[in-house]
Image (cartoon, helix red, strand yellow):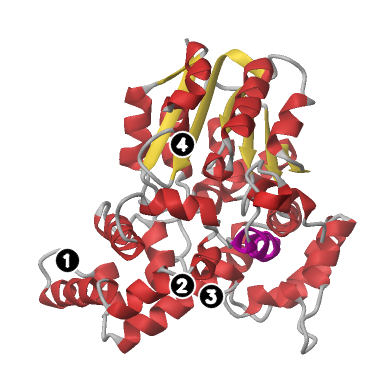
């Protein structure tokens, strides 16, 4: 897999001599499958964007969950752009499933439950022929014991990927600390078992072990956090305390019977098929819309700025940057927004998250961008309040002045 695009991004537009050992290690690490599920809430995105029908959307793909979920807004097309070919291969597999499977039950079995031994046969007989050469090569690749990657879907897909394995490690630590994760997930707020679990969680995060683990940059690689974003996440507070606060927001901020992010964090699976507690693309009621709209999703392996620079002027109505600007130097952010300015329609909306609370566009260094763009505080507040994942410090929506 070509990692040069990732390496260039992680270096944060700095000179080669300024790249640290941690930067290079992260670039090597991030070429893998990191996210089996995207950790930005697509319903919060759409609530903030308030897009008209027939919009053209450009988003960073990650695992493809949100690119598909945006089909509920009935766009004209969705460009899903990513540097990581593993994530694009996952999106392509989901698109193949929408085209190849007979109905919602099979789609849920493969991508929702994602743990049935029968999925190996479904992959071979139904999905393989629908994939391009790159995606086939990715999912057919075998590990040192001869097991292909598509077998991830036979024993619990959401336990795989770098983040899935990191969460598995966290579950082992929780077991060692006698933290009842089930009580945290399904217990009532005043349940004694849940209160006890919260107390033990607090003690674990403020332990010497937690300080040691979170003080090591490589440990956070599995969360998809590069070295420079780690600095933004911590700001003036210890990383262990920040991560504890974000986890509490995740598991306490919204009812867990509708918060699939909490289920993935505490159970590494979804609660079940249907229409509740699932990303939109996995909901039964949305299956036909997903199937009918699959052809509107266009996976693109590219640097996002360069991709935007090659689109026609005034082509795009919405740009979703995830947290990518946390990786960027000021000159690269400026170039990105100049590309959005050229490519975006008159009513273009741009949303993104940040590890810290502040938007990079509000810095003195990027003041010239604020002559063109303004932060929509109302829409930003809506997105932040509705984002069930709770793991980011800021949600920002920008529009033209």
Q: Residues within 10 Å of mark 1 (few under 14, many from 20)?
A: some
The image quarter containing residue 354 is top left
Vertical relation: 384 (above or below) 167: above
Does residue 284 belong to the magenta stretch?
Answer: no
Residue position marked by numbered label 2 in the rendering: 167
Q: Which stretch is magenta?
A: 21-34
Vertical relation: 364 (above or below) 35: above
Residue 174: x and y, percent?
33, 81
Q: Earlier in the sequence, mark 3 or mark 1?
A: 3
View extreme (right): residue: 133
Residue position marked by numbered label 3 in the rendering: 165
Residue position marked by numbered label 4 in the rendering: 45
Question: Disc 3 vs disc 4: which is toward the camera?
Answer: 3
Question: Please, what secondary structure does the residue beneath circle 2 have?
Answer: helix
**Residue at 40%, 69% in the rendered image:** 214
Query: Label 2, label 3: how many angstroms apart (C-alpha)?
Result: 5 Å
Q: Residues within 10 Å of mark 3 (few under 14, many from 20)?
A: some
> Quick check: marks 2 and 3 in contact, CB under 8 Å?
yes
């Amino acid at each position: 897999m070509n990692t040069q695009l990732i390496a260039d991004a992680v270096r944060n537009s700095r000179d080669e001599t300024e790249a640290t050992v941690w930067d290079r290690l992260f670039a090597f690490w991030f070429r893998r499958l990191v996210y089996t599920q995207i950790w930005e809430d697509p319903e919060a995105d759409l609530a903030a964007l308030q897009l008209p029908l027939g919009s053209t959307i450009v988003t960073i793909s990650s695992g493809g969950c949100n690119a598909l979920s945006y089909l509920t807004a009935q766009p004209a097309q969705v460009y899903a752009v990513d540097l990581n070919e593993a994530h694009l291969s996952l999106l392509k597999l989901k698109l193949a499933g929408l085209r190849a499977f007979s109905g919602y039950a099979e789609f849920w079995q493969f991508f929702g439950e994602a743990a049935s031994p029968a999925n190996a046969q479904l992959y071979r007989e139904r999905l393989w022929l629908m994939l391009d050469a790159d995606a086939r090569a990715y999912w057919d690749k075998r590990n040192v014991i001869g097991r292909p990657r598509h077998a991830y879907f036979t024993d619990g897909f959401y336990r795989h990927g770098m983040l899935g394995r990191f969460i598995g490690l966290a579950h082992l630590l929780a077991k060692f600390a006698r933290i009842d994760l089930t009580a945290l997930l399904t217990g009532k707020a005043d349940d004694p078992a849940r209160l006890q679990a919260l107390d033990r969680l607090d003690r674990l995060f403020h332990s010497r072990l937690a300080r040691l683990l979170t003080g090591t940059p490589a440990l956070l690689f599995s969360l998809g956090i590069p070295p420079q974003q780690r600095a933004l996440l911590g700001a003036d507070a210890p990383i262990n305390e920040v991560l504890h606060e974000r986890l509490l927001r995740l598991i306490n901020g919204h009812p867990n019977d509708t918060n699939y992010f909490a289920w993935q964090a505490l159970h590494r699976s979804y609660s079940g098929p249907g229409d509740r507690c699932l990303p939109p693309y996995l909901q039964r009621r949305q299956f036909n819309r997903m199937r009918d709209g699959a052809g509107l999703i266009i996976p693109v392996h590219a640097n996002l700025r360069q991709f935007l620079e090659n689109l026609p002027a005034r082509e795009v109505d919405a740009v979703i940057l995830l947290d990518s600007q946390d990786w960027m130097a000021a000159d690269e952010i400026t170039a990105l927004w100049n590309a959005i300015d050229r490519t975006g329609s008159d009513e273009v909306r741009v949303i993104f998250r940040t590890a810290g609370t502040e938007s990079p566009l509000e810095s003195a260094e990027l003041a010239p961008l604020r002559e063109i763009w303004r932060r929509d505080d109302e829409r930003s507040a809506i997105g932040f309040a509705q984002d069930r994942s709770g793991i980011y410090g800021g949600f920002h929506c920008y529009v033209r002045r």
